[in-house]
Image (cartoon, rainbow, N blue to C red):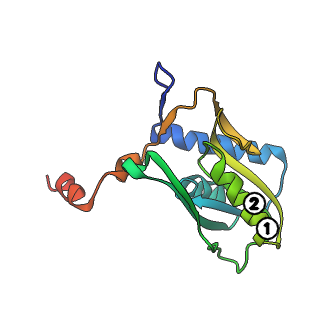
Amino acid sequence: MLTEDGKHLYVSYDEYHNLIEKLAIKVFQSGWEFDTILCLARGGMRPGDILSRVFDKPLAIMSTSSYRADAGTLQGNLDIARYITTPKGEIAGKVLLVDDLADSGHTLNAVLNQLRNNYKPITELRSAVIWTKALSKFVPDYSVEFLPTNPWIHQPFESYDAMRPAQLIEKWSV
């Protein structure tokens, strides 16, 4: 649900999963065949997992991080893992890169450049995200929602960013 001022988008679990399913449909209807899904952890893990199951393709994971401060609301320096975790040796062939959103576009651009320069067995790369913000300098190949007002997206699992084990114990010790 987008707030009236357009500055915040609140997404329920049902909406989130529906958007991932719509992303799968967009990729499928494009007719593009790919070998592996590479998700960017953490934001791309949930969409990547579901797409991996729907398309019955192996899921590779590359860790990136730029949102750390204030429970993940302030962007910091971009860190990209040196290695990709994949169930089949080295990542190769046609790869679908999956993340949750193209915000500024910085992460997706940096990762694609790193993949093109350092992973020669990759023959083709395409990108898929749930949301693309208007301010993004990166245009993904597949996206479900374009957000012209660049809202802050409140994803359904964000409550865990500020939750600690002691709080879970308190919650479940009723």
Picture mark count: 2
Identify the secondary structure beneath mark 2: helix
Return the x and y of residue 76 as percentages of the image width and height. 50, 53
Identify the secondary structure beneath mark 1: helix
Q: Residue at x 83, y 57 (%)?
A: 33
Q: Residue at x 67, y 37 (%)?
A: 144
Q: Pointers 2 and 1 in contact (CB under 8 A)?
A: yes
Q: Disc number at residue 113?
A: 2
Q: Residue at x 74, y 65 (%)?
A: 115
Q: Given the current orientation, which residue lies at the most extreme top position?
A: 4
Q: Nearer the viewer, residue 44 or 36?
A: 44
Disc 2 to disc 1, C-alpha distance:
6 Å
Q: Give, as a three-letter code, the residue at label 2.
A: Asn
| Residue 35 visible in the snapshot | no
Where 68 sits versus 15, above or below? below
Q: Residue at x 48, y 36 (%)?
A: 11
Which residue position is annotated with label 1? 117
Q: Give, as a three-letter code, the residue at label 1.
A: Asn
Q: Nearer the viewer, residue 13 or 41?
A: 41
Check disc 2: other Cα within 10 Å, few if <14, some if 14-19, many if 20+.
few
Return the x and y of residue 137 as percentages of the image width and height. 70, 41
